Image: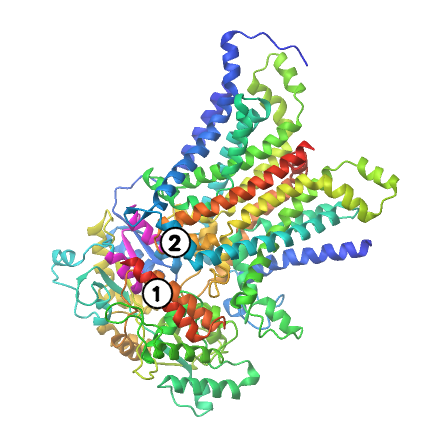
Amino acid sequence: MPNSRRLSNAASRRHLLLPYVLVAPAVAVLLALSIYPLIYSITVSLQVGDAWSIGNFTRLASDNFFLTAMAHTFVFAVAALSCEFLLGLGLALLLNSQIRGRGFFRATLLVPMMLPPVVAAIVWRLLLNPNFGAINGTLKEIGINTEALTWTASPSLAMMSVIAVDVWQWTPFVFLVLLAGLQAIPQEPYEAALIDGSSRWQTFWHVTLPLLKPAILIVLLLRTMDLLRVFDQIFILTEGGPGFATETISLYIYRSAFRFFDFGYAAAMSFVLLALTNVISVVYIRLLRNESRA
Amino acid sequence: MRLTRSLTALLLLVITVGCNKDPQPARKELTIAAISGVEGEALKQAAVDYETQTGVHITVTEFPYANLFEKELIDLNARTGAYDLIMLDDPWFPTFATKQLLTELTPLLQKRGQNGPDTDFIDASIAVCRHPYQSGSLYALPYVGNSQLFFYRKDLFEKHSLKAPATWEDVLTAAKTIQEKESGSGMYGYVMRAAQGNAAVADFMPIFWAFGGEMFDASGKPTVNTPEGIAALEFMVQMGKYSPPGYASFNADEVGAHLLQGTAAMSINWPAWIGKFDDPSKSKVIGKIEFTTLPGARKPGQAEIGNWLIAIPRTSRNAETAMDFLVWATTAEQMRRSALRGNPPTRKSLFRDPELVAKYPAYPAQMRSLETSRPRPRTPQWNEIENAFGIFLSKANSGALTPAEAMNQANAELEKIVQRGQ
Amino acid sequence: MSRALKYLLLFLSLGVALAPVYWMVTISLKSEVDHFASPPPWFSFTPTLEHYYEAFVTRSFAQYLVTSAIVAVISTLCALILGTLAAYALARFRLPYELDRKLSLWILSTRMFPAIVTAVPLFLMMRDLRLLDTKASLIIVYTAFNLPFVVWMMRGFFDEVPRDLEEAALVDGDSRLGALVRVVLPLVAPGLAATAVFCLIVSWNEFLFALVLTQTDASMTLPVGIAGRVTQYEIKWGVMSAAGAVAIVPILVFAMAMQKYLVRGLSLGAVKG
């Protein structure tokens, strides 16, 4: 290490202050935009009408709509995440191997995630229309009976449709991050495995996956956060229907705040969502930290 | 620290550019929040005409149905004063009036030499502009005189020797007949909106009322699960069998599309659609669609009124200018222009106007429908109620619940809502 | 796995990825009768530019486009500047009481906030600051939105760069910031580019806050304008698709140009953990 310079008092003070000065603006912006909302939300959630009470929180336990919305959110998140991960990993592995036109595929496969989620939802809403949409239209052309395939109108298929749209849009993101992760893995472990005579599957399981863990955890973390608070697509695709079948927690909060004008209840639900999100992210971050220490 | 200084300067410059709100011009300005669609379009045109005449610059911002309500509610409640005039669908009116968010119009009318609204306005339309309903003070003026009509394919009715439907039973018989006889061509007897929320409720209420159902009793208690109410929902689900698959999520555009493509024989709809049926770039059924008033059952058929009103928020900073515009836009001459653009008027004289009747032969039927129409319950909690009720209607139509279960659960939920409101 | 199978799978994926976008473009070019025609005309239809005309000339989509561009670019710039400075500080300095690690975590945690939680309070805050319905409110919010991501990404990149180069510059008499700009930044340029692209995409596509904080055409962005074509009676698919098609062009162009850097940038930094 080069020898540390001897600094004068003023210079040394400036030197000590520098990191704080550099971080201050960013912290100030974030603080300003999170402190006020936090205080406001706490205040309003503890009021019912004009009186102080915890009524908003106790109402949560008996509100079927709230509990159902939470269940829907989880089902949505888990299903979408699994599909996106498996497909994204598959695509990343495909593109990491020796094929021509890599750049082309990589570029074009990213297109879905470039669309504004609102636009993607609108396009899919049109495609999935049971009578006039291209999906059922094309299926009919090849002879499949589409009477029961009412997609966003059917309570059983609606959730699946909504998940499918999210998978279509965000698998490219998972694919991108995992591809980057794969390409960051050095050659030596592979060569060693080859010398050891392991099979393709063994190499994948014992060499690739472990080295890919940081990327996997990061992408899972980012996607989970986004999936738990999904709003745009469902708002446009089904508005939570049919009959509440696709209502997620963000939608219910939005409705309570902006249509029923019940800010207190919306705030109470937001805290529950926030707490949940924090717990999950702490778990992921712990796993990540263990990985980077290893 | 040259670098920090230049960075700070850059940041400040960038922020200043971003904060670009045009400096207020000296002329008078108004902002209107309007509904996306033919009504908003007509108001936009009126605004342009007004500016040419008076020099007052009017900005019209359009929002989709659900968003319009939210934007207006939050703007008026938060007193941001962004809008000087707002368009209200009449069921929203009680929410705004009860919270005292609107300017009372009678004093403003008196300043302009009128004692109250013109008697040329249709009573049913003015009634929904008063709070309390019918008898109270005036807080809005009616701009678009929508009330439901019943549409049917007269060519198919003639083909199968059916007479125009007068009762809902007629409708069911006709739907069955047409669908069976036309089964080869992908034809459906009926099409309706059953998407949860405003769509399902708006299409259901006429059936509900005709069967003798009432949402609330005299004391304000919810009564949707009476035998009549359940019978009405059972009927709706039965009609669903002759509707295109997926109708449980249909909104106005799907219903319109089916009618325009010629794949549905009957429907309840709003008069604004009439113009489209004869537009060759949109319709495959030119000249084949007939309209009549709504069928009855136990009780005579009553259309649901769905007028668009215009009100002035209390927080508007240009109330007088806004009132000038409002009075101008609702005069017979201006409303006639709006009618020519596809909006049903709210004045008797215009419904009888020969030129308009020649262009819109359905006007006599529309006026009859409007004069005998009834509004949805005038409660400030309508939004929550419509939302909850709509969910259960949708569940019954998608088969998730039986009609009896749906109505009972709906009633329980409505009771919860009403209790919270007390 | 055989080469042929690989290519088959890739082309299949490509088809699935691009078909809906293609469909949207065709909708923007078809007249309304064709929108709902059965069977759906994937290829055979007479194109018309009426929807593009309606969107950009008759209606205000050109204005929405400009607003979206201004808001996205400025908020990305702000986030990049503030975030990179903060990331550099957190990467290079050890603060007392493990403050640097705690700050990193706190900054990251703000990204976990579900947007809906802050929508109403931010609306009220902007109202009190008289910033409602201005581009400035969106710029501020989007900057805050993108900051955590920038800090996190750039910190990863800075961690990758060995300190020797800066130390050499410092010994030569450069200031800390000078060293940052002249020595380190060029090295993390790919990462910076990748981060910039992500921020631009996020700001360009954002919906919820734009919905809540804008009230008139003066500040509406493209996503809000597009969603607003859902009228009470019909959905103006043609206009929406035309606007949607145009909305993705800038992002596509920019992302394709930066595409090389995207993967390199990601693999240089945070992915390594």
Residue in front for this viewpoint, B419 or C231? B419
Q: Give amino acid for label 1.
A: Leu
Residue in front for this viewpoint, C168 or A290? A290
Residue B183 in the image: above or below residue B397: below
Mark 2 crowdedness (10 Å alpha carbons): few <14, some 14-19, many ≥20: some
- Residue at 18% across, 58% down: B105
Which structural element holds mark 1?
helix
Whether residue B136 is visible to the viewer of this picture, yes or no, is: yes
Is the same chain shared between marks 1 and 2? no
Mark 1 crowdedness (10 Å alpha carbons): few <14, some 14-19, many ≥20: many
Residue A34 in the image: above or below residue A161: above
Q: Is residue C199 left or right of residue B11?
A: right
Q: What stretch of residues is rendered in magenta?
A: B70-98
Whether residue C29 is visible to the viewer of this picture, yes or no, is: no
How many numbered marks are there?
Answer: 2
Residue in front for this viewpoint, C201 or C272? C272
The answer to if B80 sits in the magenta stretch is yes
Q: CA distance from mark 1 to mark 2?
A: 16 Å
Report which residue position mark 2 lands on: A59
Question: Given this view, does label 1 or label 2 mark the residue nearer the observer?
Answer: 2
Indicate the position of residue C257 as horizontal and vertical percent values. Answer: 63, 41
Indicate the position of residue A88 as horizontal and vertical percent values. Answer: 67, 50
Q: Quadrant of residue B343?
A: bottom left
Q: Give amino acid for label 2.
A: Arg
Q: Is residue C57 left or right of residue A227?
A: left
Report which residue position mark 1 lands on: B414
Indicate the position of residue B8 as horizontal and vertical percent values. Answer: 46, 25
The answer to if A121 sits in the magenta stretch is no
Indicate the position of residue B208 as horizontal and vertical percent values. Answer: 35, 76
The quadrant of the rendering that contains the C terminus of chain C is: top right
Chain bearing tag 1 is B
